[in-house]
Image (cartoon, rainbow, N blue to C red):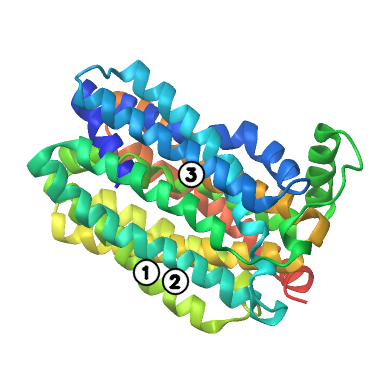
Amino acid sequence: MHRVAVSWLAWELTGSAFWVGMAAFCDLVPAVFFSPIAGAVADRVDRVRLTMLSQALIGLEAAAVATLTACDAINIGILLTLEFLNGINASFAQPARQAMMPGLVPKGELPAAVACNSLLFNVARFFGPGLAGPIIALYGVVPAIACNAIAYTLACISGLFLVVDPEARQGHKASNSLFGEVAEGVVYVARHPGLGPMLAFASVTAILLRGVQEILPPFVERVFGRGAESLALLTSCFAVGALVSGFIVAQRGRVTGASRIAVYSILAQAAAIALFVATDVFAVGMVAAVLIGATASAHGISVQQLAQHASSPAMRGRIISLWGLISRGGPAIGALGLGALGEVFGLRWPTMLGAFLSLFAIAWGIRRLSTMQRNLEG
């Protein structure tokens, strides 16, 4: 709800695809700088407490945006600043929260647990935009953003009730400087014959393909000629596809075959994005949005399963933080590029170019697939 509302707020404040892209960029790009540090911190401290603190700060940011907007004191500069702070806090919450997952379920059930976690996220993506659209249309963006502040307060409180295995809850004692441990994590991934290629593949394709989902308001208005209600429909279509796909992947409950799903889902995603921007028929756009959501979910769940399965327990927070960097930083860069190019060339051709360039990354991923399977699924 928050993300849809902030995108619409940026569009209302500026009427510019560039500034909508910049709002998404400011929320997501802190992951590029802070996720590796956050991963090293998550490998050192009490992960439940770090999660609760990060979630509390995210809730405060949402409350600030809602209050300033209600008082008519918001402008694009303030919005970008607050979204940047939100991105920093999210960068710390993600590795801490996910790194304690092995302490919540038996080891044999970890792949299914990772998939269920992503499935629940996609349930929220389904209901959130569906609620946000009518609320924004009837009452404006303030209630939709305020709901996020309430939700994060509840999420923070839930941490008090978690029972986590001590080994997964508490990180190791510092063995190096903080930045030294960050470097250790990067070197570990770079030298790993499975994690290195898979995360590199995910990085490139996230930049080329994921930006579309982060700047939907300009697509809704400029490509399809519609308003806030259609924005909610479109975002819900993304979430429906992600929900169905996530449920299917979650039911597998194993990592065998996850590498193939991670690579070939990107090929399907590129085709769906090309379809999305090739038409001005909204019904076709909705079908394409379902396919984009489904393929993005299948890719994301599979990569997370493989990262959790293949990483050393001592490195888990840092490995997950690098996935957080990719899943947030890649779309941020893609959204900024699409927004900027969209002001000059329109939205269709830059999006088509991204889909075309992704084919080279997909060909490389297919060529390395057998190596990744051996080293990630074994």
x and y percentages locating residue 265 in the rendered image? 49, 66
* Whole-percent x, y for residue 305 in the image: 63, 68
Distance (Cα) linking label 2 and label 3 = 22 Å
Instruction: Confirm whether residue 122 shows in the render.
Output: yes
Q: Secondary structure at mark 2?
A: helix
Q: Is residue 3 above or below residue 154?
A: above
The earlier-in-sequence mark between 3 and 1 is 3
Residue reaching furthest left?
138
Do the residues bearing badges 1 and 2 touch, measured as CB atoms within 8 Å?
yes
User: What's the mark number on residue 323?
Assistant: none
The front one of 282 and 140 is 140
Q: Amino acid at mark 2?
A: Gly
Q: Which residue is mark 2?
A: 246
> Residue at position x 19%, y 27% from top?
12
- Which quarter of the picture shows residue 78? top left
* SS at circle 3: helix
| Residue located beneath label 3 in the image | 208
Per the image, the residue denoted by label 1 is: 243
Above or below: residue 197 compared with residue 26: below
Q: Which circle, 2 or 3, is nearer the viewer?
A: 2
